[in-house]
Image (cartoon, grey):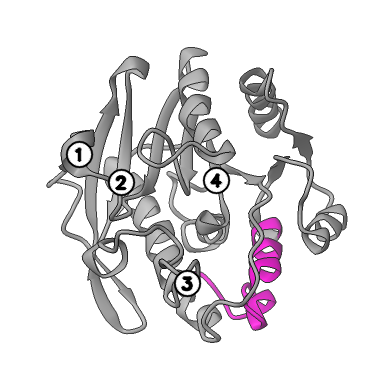
Amino acid sequence: MKVLYIVQEISPYLPETEMSTICRYLPQGIQEQGKEIRTFTPKFGCISERRNQLHEVIRLSGMNLIISDTDHPLIIKVASIQSARMQIYFIDNDDYFSRKQTLCDDSNEYFADNDERAIFFARGVLETVRKLRWQPNIVHCHGWFTGLVPLYVKKAFREDPLFSKAKVVYSIYDDAFTGSFNPDFKNKALTDGVTKKDIAVLEKPDYVALNKLIINFSDGFVIVGENLHPEVEEYLKTVNKPVIQHNPETYVQDYEIFYNTLLS
């Protein structure tokens, strides 16, 4: 089994939270079960390259992704968590990730271009995996910032033999926010293989709409925490897809069983 982890945050590169801690130890645990893993995260500007010994992977960098008719260079960096014998890949771009904050500014307001940043991150990860010629059986996404990955795997990359049989798992956290993305989010998210019908749910592009899109295109879900957004929780009940609850004591074994169930 090969598992691709696409994560919004991971320690020790960002402060310890429930999500960053799970994303740090889950890949290691699955790797220790004999599985092959790759982990991708955004290279937010607050992540020190010198302290964390990041370096650019020239052979993977150099591609341009077009978002809103503008070319954005894709830069891939890598670092190692030595104690886990695990490499972490970072998606970088000066336009989107050079600022010293992650998703909010110093006033705790979400950045107006978070929609484009999420599009760039999702496409950047999948294009890099394609360049690596690495075929994941499971694609496991953590955090709403990864929310376009299920759509792109199932639509934009569905003809690619590297992704055509992949199952997408999404972990739903207590990470709801108020407000909306840019009103043009759904048009920006369009790419080859994605139709307007696929993203019609983004007509009012907010947290609930993004999660409905995620639910539409994922194969299975992990519920983390007990305070999910009620609309998201209700929508999840309307789809006939497998769901498990995160258990802090047994989650590595639980997830491995869940992956196998989805692939059987």
Q: Which of marks 3 and 4 is nearer the N terminus?
A: 3
Q: Can residue 190 be seen in this view?
A: yes
Q: Where is residue 145 in the image (x, y as percent from the top left)?
A: 51, 58
Q: Which amino acid does label 1 sit on?
A: Leu
The residue shown at (49%, 32%) is: 3
Q: Are marks 2 and 3 in contact (CB under 8 Å)?
A: no
Mark 4 or 1 closer to N-term? 1
Contact? badges 4 and 1 (CB < 8 Å): no
Secondary structure, mark 4, is strand
Q: Distance between the residues labelled 3 and 4?
A: 17 Å
Count of numbered badges drawn on the protein:
4
Q: Disc 2 and disc 4: Cα gap in Å? A: 15 Å
Magenta region: 193-215
Q: Mark 2 points at which residue?
A: 90
In the picture of the structure, the residue carrying the numbered disc 3 is: 115
Circle 1 packing at 10 Å, graded few (<14), some (14-19), many (20+), is: some
Query: Where does label 1 land, which residue?
Result: 54
> Which residue is more in the foreground, 24 or 2?
24
Q: Which of the two discs, 3 and 4, sits closer to the camera?
A: 3
Q: In which quarter of the image is residue 75?
A: bottom left
Is residue 167 positioned above or below 84 on the image?
below
Using the numbered discs, state the Cα–Cα distance from disc 3 to disc 1 in whole angstroms: 26 Å
Q: Which of 157 and 14 is in front in this view?
A: 14
